[in-house]
Image: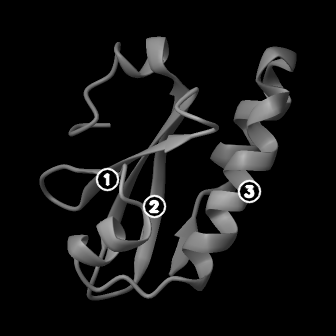
Amino acid sequence: MRVIAVSTLKAFWTGTPAYRDAEGPTMAWYREAVRADWSTPDDVKRQFRNASILKDGRVVFNIGGNKYRLVVWISYPCRVLSVRFLGTHAQYDHIDAQAI
């Protein structure tokens, strides 16, 4: 998969010292994602059983032992994944994952 907006991931853990612990788990997720070849939401679920599949290509991943949430949009035919949001569960509760 081609991952767009890796800078969004890096900005999260470099922007706030309290989130430095997100770097390792987020980069582990990133390394798995770039090696993946997801053609359907079922492919994502096979690799990440705790992923939540939303409408219109949105997927929510639990990162760092459920400490953080990552929202992405996936174009399955193009094998492109766009990072939309990375934050704590409390921050995630204040967004609309389907619209972000």
N-terminal label among 1 and 2:
1
- Could you tell me which residue is drawn at 43 percent across and 71 percent down? 47
Which mark's residue is nearer the viewer, 1 or 2? 1
- Could you tell me which residue is drawn at 74 percent across and 36 percent down? 22
Q: Position of residue 25 (x, y in %)?
A: 71, 47
At numbered mark 1, what does the secondary structure look like: helix, strand or loop? strand
The numbered dot on residue 59 is: 1
Which mark's residue is nearer the viewer, 3 or 2? 3
Q: Quadrant of the C terminus?
A: top left
User: How far separated are the C-alphas under marks 1 and 2?
Assistant: 10 Å
Q: Amino acid at mark 3?
A: Met
Dividing the picture into quarters, in which one does residue 42 lie?
bottom left
Q: Position of residue 52 (x, y in %)?
A: 27, 48
N-terminal label among 3 and 2:
3
Residue that extends furthest to the left in the rendered view of this protein: 55
- Could you tell me which residue is drawn at 26 percent across and 88 percent down? 77
Is residue 75 depicted above or below 78 in this figure?
Answer: above
Dividing the picture into quarters, in which one does residue 74 lie?
bottom left
Q: Position of residue 48 (x, y in %)?
A: 42, 61
* Direction from residue 59 to residue 8 in the image, left or right: right
Would you name the residue on which mark 2 appears?
82
Q: How is the image coloured?
A: one colour
Q: Residues within 10 Å of mark 2 (few under 14, many from 20)?
A: some
Q: Amino acid at mark 2?
A: Ser
At numbered mark 3, what does the secondary structure look like: helix, strand or loop? helix
The numbered dot on residue 27 is: 3
Is residue 85 depicted above or below 67 in this figure?
Answer: below
Q: Residues within 10 Å of mark 1 (few under 14, many from 20)?
A: many
Q: Amino acid at mark 1?
A: Val
User: How far separated are the C-alphas under marks 3 and 2?
Assistant: 15 Å
